[in-house]
Image (cartoon, rainbow, N blue to C red):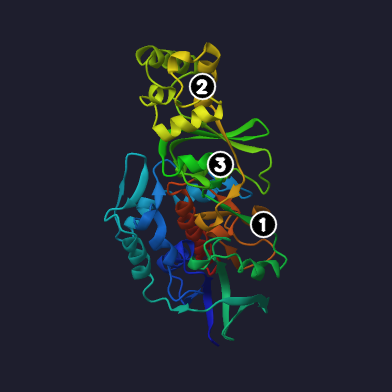
Amino acid sequence: MSEICNLIIIGGGASGLAAAVTAISLGVEKIAVLERLPRTGKKILATGNGRCNLSHQNISAPDYQGSYDVTGILQEFGSAEAFFESLGLYCRTDEQGRIYPYSMSANAVLDALRLHCSGVPEFCNEQAVNLFRKNRIWHILTESGTEYLSRFVIVSTGGTVQPKFGTDGTAFRLLENLNIPVIQGRPILCPLLSDKNILRSLKGLRVKGSVSLYHKNQIIRTESGEIQFTEQALSGICIFNLSSYLKYQFSGCQISVNLFPELELPEVIARLYSCQAVRCGASCEDMLSGLMQKPLARTVLKQIRIRADMPCSQLSDLQIRHLAGICHDFRFPVLGTVKEQAQASAGGVSGKALDKQLQVKACPGLYVTGEAVDVHAPCGGYQLHWAWASGYTAGKAVAESLGI
């Protein structure tokens, strides 16, 4: 492609399309999108179980982790609802504050973005393999042997997980070859592997409670919600959010499950004494059936070496207290992450390398957005909100640099 573009966006995902939409809205012409997959926006269609949880009602800078300060970008971008309403897409908010398209269909989100970009050529099945600047023009070489030229480039290639959506981390080589510092990626928002010997008997259970991440008995973070047990891992949104706080080493890390987060420990003890008195002729397993599902009751009893079939009347005061203790603090060792189920990744271009508009300080005209930046957040629309906001910022910056 011999024509020089004003802007080429590498990666046609959420942040890349948001950048294109913004640049077009501000009058930028000669824009192109390079996408390594057969079509753009594939990952958008899979988010929120096909409903696309595109933002959250209560978003602020402290919700985000990483080496880049997102405060200014979030403030300038404002509301994701307003952004999409400007594209003809209306939203609705659920009881938890999660924002969805009004139709509850991810297709509507992608349609809104692509309809606004209808005049922008999309070059799909094009994977960039080299990027360099010469005479103030950026050169992008692709796997097919094609060379693209542009005054400005936005890299919106995603993170290091979910290769089926085109985000496997290989695009970071383009930036590392330019000596741009990239923080090693790691999977987040995913189940956590634990002891199969404990989990085997809990497989398939879903329990309401709270979970806390500990490292060497120091509490790191607590989340609440539904905890799901699989044969090899702890899962559920609350677990996904804790996974973001794990670094590269899992040694010494534990998950504490509190089955009765609304009760203080003395209240749990009192409740157990009440169950023992009312069901004095029942087994320990049956005594607990009014408080928890039987597979969980059997597992809890096993952990403190109490037979499930033992008459509950034989429980000593010490055993009641031990039972209350494990109900309040059931420990599971963290043995790793289920990488294949990760919804996002931490890591990416170091915040120190970027200016307030996400331009690489050492490379004029080169911007990085979305998950390619070292920024990550919990489940609930926060990740996508960052994608829209960062794409908006970079698209606007390009328009300003072109004097539009």
Quarter of the image holding residue 134?
Answer: bottom right
Which of disc 2 and disc 1 is earlier in sequence?
1
Task: Determine whether 206 is above or below 83 in the image.
Answer: above
The numbered mark at residue 197 is 3
**Number of the front mark, 3 or 2:** 3
Amino acid type at circle 2 is Leu
Residue labelled with disc 1: 184
Foreground disc of the pair 3, 1? 3
| Callout 3 amino acid | Asn
In percent of the image, x 67 and y 76: which residue is there? 132
Mark 3–mark 2 CB contact (< 8 Å) = no
Query: Helix, strand or loop at disc 3?
Result: helix
Label 2, on which residue?
323
- How many neighbours does mark 1 have within 10 angstroms: few (below 14), some (14-19), or many (20 or more)? some
Q: Residue at x 57, y 51 (%)?
A: 375
- State the SS at label 1: strand
Q: CA distance from mark 3 to mark 2?
A: 19 Å
Q: Secondary structure at mark 2?
A: helix
When asked about the image quadrant of residue 350, the answer is bottom right
Whole-angstrom CA distance, mark 1 to mark 2, is 42 Å
Report the front residue among 48 and 128.
48
Q: Residues within 10 Å of mark 3 (few under 14, many from 20)?
A: few
